[in-house]
């Protein structure tokens, strides 16, 4: 959430950011509402001053044994006006608070301007693998090796829900364990195992609500939501807390299942594992000092890249353009791994710096050891990395002529020493 004072003093910057995003949000409505709220505050201050003066006058009249009736009557009129203006103020503040939740974060100056066609490839690691045989897409590989049952997954839950089986299930578990171990042992993250259901305050704190409520799975009888990403519960661990500066930065990693209703709603790429309603993901979350946040973003990106490099997958890093960046992010990189069977680059990670946008919504602060004053932390997160698209890339890159799939070497200890998935 943006600070109303920042909006008031930097309306041009906010409007320029909205324009870069292609947003139609009417900032003038917020500015007009804020002006009206401030006028009411001025009138309230004047009325409260008059009330205090009347109270002092009544006290003096009583002390002097004079009749305070007229002064009391005038004070009642002032008190009535105070009640009226306080009600108007609450109405203005409620509406202002509601509108502020719909203003996206300020786009960082380094972000390319434009729609997704303006996303900038920053670098690429490796080259697409070449094969001397006719390769298969992951759907055919899964069916041939009998490691994913798409039909029964749909029978259990509906379209775009997946049933992993046999060594397909073990591969999924191996990837999760490998990634959590990598991030905790080499990258300095603390492991977290959060709830998969969160309350409305948590979803609002990270920016999913109110804007994206229709895309979320919500319980019918309780105001709880299935998490779309571990970012939500893990970021909200410190909601309404004041952290010590000496404890920053804080790094957390968490494996969770993730649930998204919007998956598969794009009218393309809905076959197989590309877009599913439930998927597994290892998330990376950081709480850092403001001056360090963009350096921390580059480190976060490197942590996610380390996973793909260890798996031997060709990937590229894209800096997202202003029209493709998420609502809450100020700057974002996507990692896209290459899937040769599909001949496509698949997003397997997004790494974002939210600056103080989420921290304001969730009220996460730290105490500056020099000034002793509190400041909002900067929050970051990234997939480290997401499944099932990583599974797609492994199956399609490591497929063999005989239909088997080699297991990446770093995963073999997690597969009980198995080096190949065979029919």
Image (cartoon, rainbow, N blue to C red):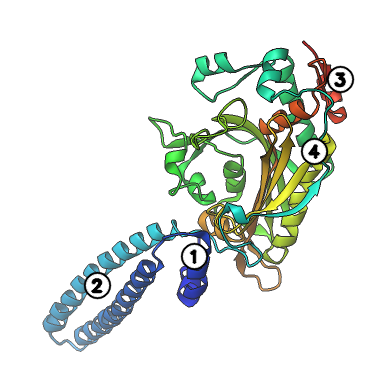
Instruction: Say which element carries label 3.
Output: loop
Q: Which residue is mark 2?
A: 82
Between the C-alphas of marks 2 and 1, the distance is 40 Å
Which structural element holds mark 2? Answer: helix
* Quadrant occupied by the C terminus: top right
**Residue in the image at 61% along x and 40% along y:** 230
N-term-proximal mark, 1 vs 4: 1
- Between the C-alphas of marks 2 and 3, the distance is 77 Å
Horizontal side of residue 147 vs 241, given as left or right: right
Q: Which residue is mark 4?
A: 128
Is 234 left, or right, of 210 in this rendering? right
Q: Is residue 304 visible?
A: no
Residue identifier under label 3: 419
Viewer-side residue, 28 vs 91: 28
Are the residues at dot 3 and dot 1 in contact (C-beta closer than 8 Å)?
no
Q: Is 167 left or right of 262, judged from the image as shown?
A: right
Which residue is found at the position 54% from the left and 37% from the top?
227
Q: Tell which circle, 3 or 1, labels the residue nearer the N-terminal end.
A: 1
Q: Nearer the viewer, mark 4 or mark 2?
A: 4
Evaluate if marks 2 and 1 touch, with contact meaning CB atoms under 8 Å apart: no
Viewer-side label of 2, 3? 3
> Is residue 300 shown above or below 73?
above
Mark before the other along the chain sequence, 2 or 1: 1
The residue under label 1 is 19
Q: Quadrant of residue 64?
A: bottom left
Report how far apart the C-alphas of labels 3 and 1 lie in the structure.
Answer: 52 Å
């Amino acid at each position: 959430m943006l600070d109303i004072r920042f909006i008031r003093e930097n309306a041009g910057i906010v409007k320029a950011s909205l324009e870069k995003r292609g947003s139609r949000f009417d900032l003038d409505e917020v500015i007009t509402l804020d002006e009206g709220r401030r006028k009411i505050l001025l009138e309230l201050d004047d009325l409260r001053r008059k009330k205090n003066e009347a109270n002092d006058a009544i006290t003096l009249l009583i002390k002097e044994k004079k009749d305070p009736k007229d002064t009391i009557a005038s004070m009642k009129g002032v008190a009535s006006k105070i009640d009226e203006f306080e009600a108007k103020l609450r109405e203005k503040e409620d509406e202002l608070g509601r509108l502020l939740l719909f203003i996206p974060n300020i786009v960082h100056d380094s972000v390319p301007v434009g729609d997704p066609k303006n996303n900038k490839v920053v670098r690429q690691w490796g080259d697409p693998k070449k094969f001397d045989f006719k390769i298969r897409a992951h759907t055919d590989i899964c069916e041939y090796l009998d490691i994913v049952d798409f039909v029964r997954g749909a029978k259990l839950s509906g379209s775009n829900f997946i049933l992993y089986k046999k060594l397909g299930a073990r591969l999924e578990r191996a990837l999760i364990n490998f990634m959590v171990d990598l991030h905790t042992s080499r990258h300095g993250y603390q492991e977290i195992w959060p709830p998969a259901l969160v309350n409305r305050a948590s979803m609002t704190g990270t920016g999913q609500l109110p804007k994206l409520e229709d895309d979320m799975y919500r319980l019918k009888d309780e105001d709880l939501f299935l998490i779309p990403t571990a970012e939500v519960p893990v970021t909200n661990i410190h909601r309404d807390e004041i952290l010590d500066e000496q404890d920053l930065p804080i790094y957390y990693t968490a494996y969770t299942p993730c649930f998204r209703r919007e998956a598969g709603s794009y009218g393309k790429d809905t076959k197989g594992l590309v877009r599913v309603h439930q998927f597994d993901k290892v998330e990376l979350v950081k709480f850092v000092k403001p001056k360090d946040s963009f350096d921390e973003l580059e480190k976060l990106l490197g942590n996610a890249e380390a996973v793909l490099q260890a798996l031997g997958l060709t990937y590229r890093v894209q800096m997202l353009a202003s029209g493709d960046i998420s609502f809450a992010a100020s700057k974002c990189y996507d990692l896209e791994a290459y899937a040769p069977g599909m001949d496509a680059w698949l997003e397997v990670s997004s790494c974002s710096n939210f600056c103080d946008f989420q921290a304001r919504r969730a009220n996460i602060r730290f105490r500056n050891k020099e000034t002793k004053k509190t400041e909002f932390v900067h929050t970051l997160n990234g997939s480290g990395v997401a499944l099932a698209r990583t599974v797609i890339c492994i199956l399609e890159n490591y497929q063999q002529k005989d239909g088997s799939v080699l297991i990446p070497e770093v995963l073999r200890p997690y597969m009980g020493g198995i080096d190949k998935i065979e029919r």
